[in-house]
Image (cartoon, rainbow, N blue to C red):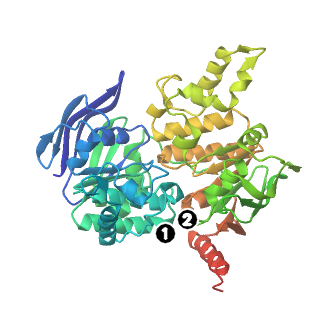
Amino acid sequence: MILETKGLCKQFGNMYALKDIDFSIKEGEIHGLVGENGAGKSTLIKILTGVYHLDKGEIFVEGKKVIITDPAQSRELGINVIHQDRNLIPIFNGVENIYLGLKSETKNLCFVDFKKMKEKIVKVMKEYGIDVPLDKMAKELSSPQKTLFEITRAMMTECKLLILDEPTASLTDKETKILFDIIKKLNEKGTAILYITHRMDEIFQLTNRITVFKNGELVKTVNKNEIDKDGLISLMTDKWTRSKVKEKKSDFGKVIYEVKNIASDNKVVKDVSFKVREREILGIFGLGGSGRTELLEAIYGFEKVSSGEIYLEDKKLEKINTTNSLKNGVVLINEDRRGKSLISTRSVKDNIVLSTIDNYVKKGIYNAKKEKEDAENKVKELKIKTSSINQPTGELSGGNQQKVVFAKALMSNPKIFLCDEPTQAVDVKTREEIHKLLRECADKGSAVVFVTSDLKEMLDVADNILIMAQGRTWELIPNEDITSEQILKYCYLERNLKNGNN
């Protein structure tokens, strides 16, 4: 065994995050780890990488008992991890980011030899078929490029076990295939992989064995060919069965939100127009680099708009910024929940009321009782798993953090929901709850603009689908008897037309 744990336990207060975990990974295998949000997967990763210290139990690497006290020691043991949130410094280029935590090459005893460092990186990248520009800053890169940077960093030292935590959460199908090819190359060269995801198709496509966590305990480890998707889900959840999301609608109301010829100051969004009606979920789908995220950030006010107009209920919005968007009933569920939607060190309560905090002040007096009641109601309404509303949000699972993001959005009674990857890195149960919530909001008269890189999810949720490519919107397609292959054909067709290959 490359890795084995015996009786692993970790508590936070009176709650067990992990309890008596006996877990193992064989040399050269791709091992899947699944479970609902809050099942204990992230806690296990943090113990194996020295972020958390275990309360009880033992860890063995290649049969030898080890005590992991910090991330550097974990790397020395050959354990590397790529987290959901990429650990890159935005203003550092590729060479600087890849060498984070590694010993720099030097010349003349004291000068950093960037040329030699780059040569070593290029050698590793060629070995695994990785192609990412090293001269660009991390903030200029796409999500898949950032992931490839992290994989390259892991391969710069002897990597015996690579842990991948939701690596495809914001990747398109094409980008996911590229990543899978690299994962298989790593595995063929002897690196064991621990693959953690909520996407069941990926688990069955990649892994040899699968371990299921639930409520901090290991339920079962099975060979892939011994179980199917429904069987795996039943092990993960407490007597929960997936139910059909309410049927998509066609009896929409009036146009409530209209975007005309919007272009962003950063030139990523070049010419976007669309209309969304009351009770409608409008999906916007495009391949990597199409400008989906940048579009939502521009029309909400995170990015500057260089030209174009936005109308809300036939009224032109004169100043497009985050403050006015919120006042006008427009909310953004951002792809980067930890970076742009939540303050992880603040409590659940503080995050829920963050954007509507002014509502609790009257004549200079702050109504703390009302604030507490509203936060507790939202926690109950969205079934947020937390020890109390005063628990730091960063201690919650990813799915429960996302529910806090929605709770905060709902506090302002929005008319327009701009949703960018709203189910990213959440379990199947939470994913369905979010889908139902958006449909319920639409049924009550709101309009939803829905962006996801998961084509199946797009077809499950959207009433109509707008194709976006090269920063422009193209075809509007009713979501009626259309396949994922047809959607992709539209994406590639529009890209080819733009490039003049007609």
**Residue 226 visible:** no
Marked residue nearer the N-terminal end (2 or 1) = 1
Foreground of the two, 193 or 438: 193
Query: Mark 2 or mark 1: which is in front?
Result: 2
**Residue 87 placement (x, y as % from top left):** 41, 48
**Residue 348 placement (x, y as % from top left):** 54, 28
**Residue 502 placement (x, y as % from top left):** 66, 86
Q: Report the number of numbered marks.
A: 2
**Residue 285 visible:** yes
According to the picture, the residue beneath numbered tag 2 turns out to be 288
Foreground of the two, 470 or 444: 470
Which residue corresponds to the image point at 69% horizontal and 15% vertical from the top-left?
367
468 sits to left or right of 279: left
According to the picture, the residue beneath numbered tag 1 turns out to be 174
367 sits to left or right of 398: right
Give the spatial CA distance, label 2 vs label 1. Answer: 9 Å
Where, by quadrant of the figure, is residue 501 drawn?
A: bottom right
Residue, far front: 108
Q: In this view, does 481 lie above or below 365?
A: below
Where, by quadrant of the figure, is residue 148 drawn?
A: bottom left
Q: Which three-letter amino acid code belongs to the residue tagged 2?
A: Gly
Q: In this view, does 340 lie above or below 390?
A: below
Which residue corresponds to the image point at 49% horizontal and 51% vertical from the top-left?
90
- Mark 1 is surrounded, within 10 Å at the Cα level, by few (under 14), some (14 to 19) or many (20 or more) other residues, namely few
**Residue 438 placement (x, y as % from top left):** 65, 46
- Mark 2 is surrounded, within 10 Å at the Cα level, by few (under 14), some (14 to 19) or many (20 or more) other residues, namely many
Foreground of the two, 338 or 414: 338
Marks 2 and 1 close (CB-CB < 8 Å): yes
Q: Mark 2: which secondary structure?
A: loop
Q: Which three-letter amino acid code belongs to the residue tagged 1?
A: Lys
